Image (cartoon, helix red, strand yellow):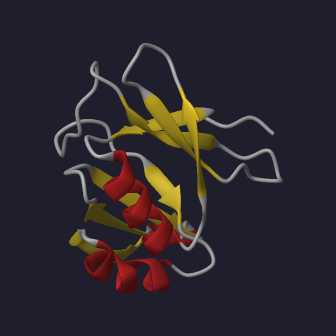
Amino acid sequence: MQHAIDWFEIPVSNMDRAIAFYEAMSGRSLRREPFGPPGSELAIFEIPQDGGVQGALMSSPNSQPSQLGTIVYLNATPSIDAWLDRVVSSGGSVVMPKFELPDGNGCIAQIMDSEGNRVGLHTE
């Protein structure tokens, strides 16, 4: 299956804090790996068994967290409500509450993560 997105990276300034946030919010593990130039590393989200989109948190001197750039929507299946319930206790905030998309395209919400990135959540 082809996807519009094959890989994503969410920039972070504090990898330990970001891993703790994303693992607590999503209930999924991340795997740390060295990456690129000195001082850079990735924390890769679990690889989907269905061949879905893959991605990672990225710590690098060449990237910065931002709330004004591209928005990545993470798959919050099976329950976007459960993810949203864990955002604040994990160190983030909800910036756009759950919103029903038209034509049965599911629900979205947006959060501010522990690093200052605006990140979307989606579920069908």
Quadrant in which the N terminus is drawn: top right
In the displayed structure, 114 sits above or below 10; it is below
Which residue appears at 47% of the width and 85% of the height? 82
Front residue of this view, candidates 94 and 57: 57
Q: For residue 107, say whether it is visible.
A: no
Quadrant in which the C terminus is drawn: bottom right
Residue 63 point in image, percent of width and height: 28, 26
Front residue of this view, candidates 3 and 33: 33
Residue 16 point in image, percent of width and height: 37, 53
Which residue appears at 30% of the width and 63% of the height? 110
In the displayed structure, 52 sits above or below 61; it is below
Which residue appears at 54% of the width and 69% of the height? 76
Residue most extreme to the front: 38
Q: How many marks?
A: 0
Which residue appears at 63% of the width and 33% of the height? 6
Q: For residue 3, say whether it is visible.
A: yes
Residue 59 point in image, percent of width and height: 36, 33
Q: Quadrant of residue 9?
A: top left
Residue most extreme to the top: 37
In the displayed structure, 78 sits above or below 101; it is below
Say whether residue 103 is left or right of residue 96.
Answer: right
Residue 7 point in image, percent of width and height: 58, 33
